[in-house]
Amino acid sequence: MSPVLRALGGRIGAFRNPSSLGAKLVLILTAVGLIGSAAITLLLASVIVPSFNQLESRSVDAHVERTRAALGEYASKVESAVRDYGDWNSSYDYMANQTEAFEQESFSPLAMANLGVNGMAYVARDGRIVIARWRDGEKDDSGMRAALIAQIREIDFRKALGSRNSASFFVRLGPVVSAVGVAQVRRSDGSGTPRGYVLMARRITSQQLSGLLQLTAGLDLANVTDTNLITPSRETMRIAVPILGPAGHAVASAAFTVPRDVSVLGRRMLILAVAGSTILLLVVLLMLRRMIGRLVLRPLRRVENHMQVVRASGALGLLPDEAARQDEIGSLGRSFNAMLRQLKDLREQLEVQSFALGRSESAVAVMHNVRNALNPISTILSQGIAQPAPMDRGTLDRAVAELAKDDIPPARRAKLVAFVAAAVEAEAKDREERRRQLQVGREAMSHVLEIIGEQQHAANGRPELEPCDVTEIIARNATIARYSGELSIAFSFPARPYRVMGSRVILSQVIGNLFANAAEAIGAMELGGGTIGVTIEEGNGQTVIAIRDDGEGFAIDRAPTLFQRGFSTRKDKSGGFGLHWCANSMTAMQGSLRLESEGEGRGAVAVLTLATAVAEQQELAA
């Protein structure tokens, strides 16, 4: 066997040996895969599970609120019906002088059927029951009438009504739960000393509750609590909402079961995300192992084999295969060939790396500016999502429906007309405010597009200088900066235009960065707001722009380090590309940027200096 084959076989055996580099690489990648898989699982679980739990909690709250609203609406209908009997001259006269004619006409089974109630009663001011009736279908129910009378004697009408003339609540009459409306008996115009109370009761059943909630629901009379009772299981969740009585305590519970779709979806998504990420990690590690074996281990074996061949044969042959590569292996191969060629190749690698580093820094700076420009858009969208409707739609619909009736009193009609007019005006103001915010968002988005477009246009050269109105740039960035956070910042700047020589898009990014830094400095004072003032002066062919804030400022001896790449005054942030990029951009526009401060807690001043656009250049730009 030749020496070359013997050397090659020896190296293959060493690679298969557990102490070889290949075996160690397999163990390292396996450990990295296991640790990475566990870390990904924990990370996804810490993000997905709380998020879906929060969504499920919101869904439960929505079910509870919808149930309360349905019960309230059911009771309010009874209250509306009883209010008509309360403010009625006939009822007022009847409480003073009971007549059979009134009872046969207004207290008859037909009248109760038309009102949609099961029980009615008139109660004197001293608690004496004048008359009471309970209808169950087509006949009177004496047992339920007795239960209604017993319940009436337990109700404190003055406490239930308070300062109002009518109220509604739920009561339990044995196995029956009813919505009760109570109103004071007065004249039709609301005048006169109340002579008692009129009460109406409408029974609510599980079928009616299911119809109100649009899902299968029932009345729970056994498990009654004054708080919401949530009983989750693996696939479903039982929700029990208390039905409150006149004293504010529950008389029954509206119970229903809903599927835990959000929780199930969260578990499935977590499993899918963990499985997918684990498989992806395994594929990446496998490919990494193969690529390392192909790009590193095999060339190293070939280099070692070639060295053994050279030592055994004494022939100083070149290593052409490895010498053609532009990496560490190629550098090792080129060391066998010539020192000059090695130096040349290293110089080329250094240039490639410098270009990549410069391109990376440029990309980071552009993303920094894009982030600053996108912050206002995020704030505007968050405010628009969180802003509630100016007027409840259901209330407005009921007002319009009531206006359509011909028999409402003029005073009531006037109030409804005023209410509808106020609702329309509030809706118009809300629409105008949203339009103004969207206008600011559109300007911020245009600013982002200009940043990206300018970066693509000037990727390989210095920025093209042209006359631009710095006052207009400051005004637009000030408008955008107002929406970049939750602070209240007052801006002041000159009104008349000042034209300078520079790149409009780059100068806008520089001013936007300085405004963002000033806003952060104001926020660090924790005063809830501050001021940013801009002054512009011209002289000796230059324009000096001073941006002053009343933020936290900085120590005077730290001024030289503020423009270093990677330096940041924020302890909770890293990066520091903003001021470094701004200084380089001002230099590229043949200008300068410096920062001044009288000390910590005394604000700061950013001073920009640019060449003033001469009259001929302004005319060409115009």
Image (spheres, helix red, strand yellow):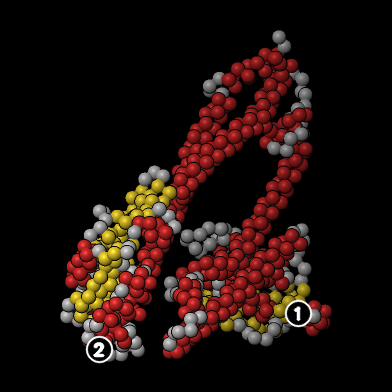
Q: Nearer the viewer, residue 553 or 291?
A: 291
Name which residue lies at 26% across and 54% down. 223
Q: Which of the image's four quarters has the N terminus?
A: top right
If you read the primary sequence from the N terminus, does the residue marked by circle 2 or circle 1 appear first?
A: 2
From this viewpoint, is residue 367 visible? yes
From this viewpoint, is residue 530 visible? no
User: What's the CA distance linking mark 2 and mark 1?
Assistant: 84 Å
Q: Nearer the viewer, residue 419 or 482?
A: 419
Quick check: 456 left or right of 534? Answer: right
| Residue occupied by mark 1 | 613
- Residue 346 lies, with reference to residue 14, above or below; the image says below
Amino acid type of the residue that numbered disc 1 sits on in the rendered structure: Ala
Q: Nearer the viewer, residue 477 or 535?
A: 477
Q: Secondary structure at mark 2?
A: loop
Quick check: 206 left or right of 548? Answer: left
* Residue lying furthest top: 1
Q: Position of residue 427 (x, y in %)?
A: 54, 78
Name which residue lies at 38% across and 51% down. 257
Quick check: 466 left or right of 22? Answer: right
Task: Answer with the quarter of the image where residue 4 lies.
Answer: top right
Q: Within 10 angstroms of label 1, few (less than 14), some, or many (20 or more) residues?
A: many
| Residue occupied by mark 2 | 193
Name which residue lies at 67% across and 13% down. 6
Q: Within 10 angstroms of label 2, few (less than 14), some, or many (20 or more) residues?
A: few
Task: Answer with the quarter of the image where residue 118 lies.
Answer: bottom left
Amino acid type of the residue that numbered disc 2 sits on in the rendered structure: Thr
Q: Nearer the viewer, residue 326 or 484?
A: 484
